[in-house]
Structure formats: C-alpha cells, structure tokens
Amino acid sequence: MILQTNPLEGALQATVQIKEGNMALAEQFKTELLTLVDNGNKYIIVNFEQIIYVDSSFLGALVSALKHAMNKGADIAVVGLNKDIKSLFQLVRLDKVFKIYASAQQALNGA
Amino acid sequence: MPKSKKILLVDDSPLILKIIGQALEKDGFECLKAGNVPDAMEHLKNDIPDLILSDYQMPDIDGFAFRQSLMAIPEYRNIPFMFLTSIADHDHMQRGMNMEVIDYIIKDTPIAFVLSKINNFLNSIRERHQRTIQELSSAAMALNLYSIPQDAPAVDGFDIHFWHRSYQNYPGGDFIDLITIENKYTFIILGDVMGKKWGAWFFSFGYLSYIRAAVRLCTSEGDLSTKSIMQKINSVIYLDPVVSGLLSTLSLIMINAETHTISYTGAGDLPLLYYNKAECSLNKVSSAGLLLGVSKDGGFDEHVFTMQPHDQLLMVTDGMIDKETPRGKKTDLKEFENEVTQYLGRADSFQDMKDNGFLNKKAQEQIDDCSLIFIQKNS
C-alpha cells in the first residue's frame, strides 16, 4: 500500500508512504486514491510530507483522482509539500486546482 | 551513460550480504541490501530493481513466502527473481521454478560464476527489450505515426529549431507539431502527456489529432486567437473519456508572418523563456491556463507580443528541468535559466547549445523525455 489512512474529524488523511512519486508507482497511487473516493470519503487530505520528488505521471494520477472525486461530490486537499514540490505545483498551476495547506489541521480548518 | 543495474539482495546472513554485495558493487551493480523480507518490501516501495536475488531459508518469512507475496502484487511480479540458497535439493528447486523464478543459485557457487549468470541474464533481457522497442518503433513509422516532426518550418523573419530526446530510447509523452497555414500563420505546439513511455506516447496521438483539428477549424473560420483554439481543444478533451484519463500540458504559439507578432496560450505548461537582447535579460512569460481536461473552463489567457531583432524565445517540457542531485531528484527551473542564459543572445545560440554539449549534458542528466523549441527573430 502506498497510502496509509487515518480518519480525522470530518476527513480522511491519506499519507503517501514513499520518497519518490514516479511512473512506476503512479498507477497504484491512483487506484488506491480512487478506492478511497469510491468508499464514500467526501474529504481526503493527501499528506505528502514523506515525498521528496514527484514526476509528471504521479501528478497526473493525483489530478485524475481529483476529477473522479469532484464527479462524486468529494474533494481532495494536499498537505505537507516540500519547497520544491510546492514550486512545481505553482509552476504548472496545480495550486489553482488543489486546495493546498501546510498541515492536516489547517486543511480541516479550511474545509 | 546508461545507469548501473540495480539488484536487491535479500539474506538474513550479514556475511553473505557483505560478500555478495561487495562482489556485485565491484562488478558495477548498484546493490540494495535487506536482512529480511519486510526490509526488502520497504526497499521496493522506493526502488524497483532490475533483479532480486533472495535467500530461501530465512527466519519468520522465508524466500518462497517472499516470492509468493511478490507474485500477488502486479508492480512487483515481473521483477526477475533468483533464489540464492545453500540447499541443493531438487524438490526445493522445482518448487522455486514453479513460481516463475528464473534461476536457482547454490551459495557455494564461485562468485565469478554467479556474476556471469546475472550478467548473461540481464544482457539477454536488454537485447530482447531493445528488439521489441525497435519492432514497435518500425511499426509506428510504417504507420506514419510521429509525435515529433522531422523538420522545422521556414518562417520569414524567424529561425526555428527544436530538439528532443526520448528517455532511455522509449517514445514518451512529449509531442511537438508545427503547422503553417497559408504561408502566413505558423502554429508551434509543444505538449507533454503526463505519463511515460508507451502509454503516454500512444495518448499523444489522440491529443495531437484534437489539436490539429482545432487549429484547422478555428483558422478556417477566421478565428486566429490561440486562447479560443485552446478553449476548443480543452472542451473536447474534457468531455472525451478516452483521453481525459491522462492529462497533458500544452504550449501553443502562433507566429504571424505579416505582423511578426507572437500569440501564446498555455495549459499547465512551464513558462516561456524570453531573452531580450537589448536588455541582455531572460524573462518568463507565464500563462494562466490549467492542464488540458482538468476543468471545463480551463482559465486560459493569451499573451500577444512582438519580438525585436535578435530576441530569442524558448519553450521547454519538464524533462529539461528535472535532474538527479546528490539529495535526490529535483525539478528546478531557476537552475535551468541560469545554465541556459550563458548560451543566449548570440546569432548561433542554438547551434552553440548543440555543439558545445549543453543539450547533450541535459540528455545525460535526464530522467524523463525532454524537448526544447528555440525561436529567434532575425534582423
């Protein structure tokens, strides 16, 4: 499992347990995230604090999962981005697509 | 330089890990070591090795149970697996072979022989792999499927060059197209389907078909706005379940040969880099649009500007700015800007980047396929 989940009040936190989000893991990441959406979770907070690098296929998987979530009336927020990954999100305007917070607690307050 | 092959060595004996590990490293392999199966599974989360060499007899979870759990995980089941054991028992060997294990090495086999076995096996895999890619590439060429054009167009008043390198010789998700309409309008298209290798390459044709159609339809109706072309492309992709599963960036530029103006609209792409010759400065031109297919609206904008003689404009995909560093992989546009600036501002900038190794250096650092389009205004 790439995602370790723990329920929070009004949300589900899914912590990504890998250092490098790349093509080899993108499909599995997407499948796990889609399953969380299909299981009826309405607000999923994806925690990136263990990840140091993501490639475009991994980002693509995250965006695909968000599209699926929105179709099901759910939402995905992203927390724990390191400086480089946060810049990458801004560079390709994913900061306009995802709600980005520093921590899960802030994501809960912002929800 | 091809990267060294990675081998995951799993054995509960620290001595075996040390001896075989050293021999593998001396022979040029990168060796990941695990003293038990849970440790091996931890390694696999971050690194997919080219081969797993595992002991059979280990406390708690033995080699067979390890192999069985790998076979149940689609991402891991095809990693070549060899047993390394001290047991010369034919029943055990047969049991291993039945689990799609490629070989069974007895521990007292001389180490040189073990290395030859591993090298022979990995060489045969590589040859088979290259043959398959070659056959698929020939088939694609026979069908006239190119996601990268053969030549850049000649546009009056501009020099246009492009450079592309696939990652490890796989066709990837980057695509380039150049469309000239009525000798007046040249559209330059650079995109990156956000996946890698064959899947992304296949989808790049779907994207390119929509883009070509949208460019032709809009221009035939007299609509020359890159923003409205992008909106059309986005709305079709947003609604098409076949291509919307994978997302793509797109930079779309139109050069008007009569007015010498450039129009630019981007979708989730990296900023254009504009070198202003008069000011000797490199500036970013950033678009507002989201990745294709993410939202119905896309939030696109359009930049229209005129290039002055000797000004230069660069379009790049993320493969150009990704690199390996001692602290891990990194995406760094700022560093790319710093590196490329020293080549800009000259009449032969693109040739210089090619000849003096900048682009080849990028190709060696690359961890994805990478593309660069270079546009220079003539005097």
Image (spheres, grey):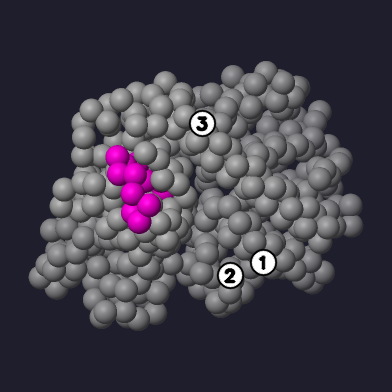
Residue underneath mark 2:
B243
Residue B369: name its quadrant.
top right
Q: In the image, which residues are magenta?
A: B80-92
Type of amino acid at the residue the image marks with label 2: Val
Residue A81 percent across, percent down from the top left: 28, 48
The reply, left or right, for residue B181 in relation to residue B45 is right
Q: Which mark is residue B116?
A: 3
Residue B121 percent across, percent down from the top left: 54, 41
Residue underneath mark 1:
B206
Q: In this rendering, does residue B136 appear at all?
A: yes
Residue B70 percent across, percent down from the top left: 35, 57
Disc 2 element = helix
The reply, left or right, for residue B19 in relation to residue B110 is left
- Residue at image position (80%, 37%) is B158
Q: Residues within 10 Å of mark 2 (few under 14, many from 20)?
A: many
Magenta stretch contains residue B88: yes
- Residue at image position (51%, 31%) is B116
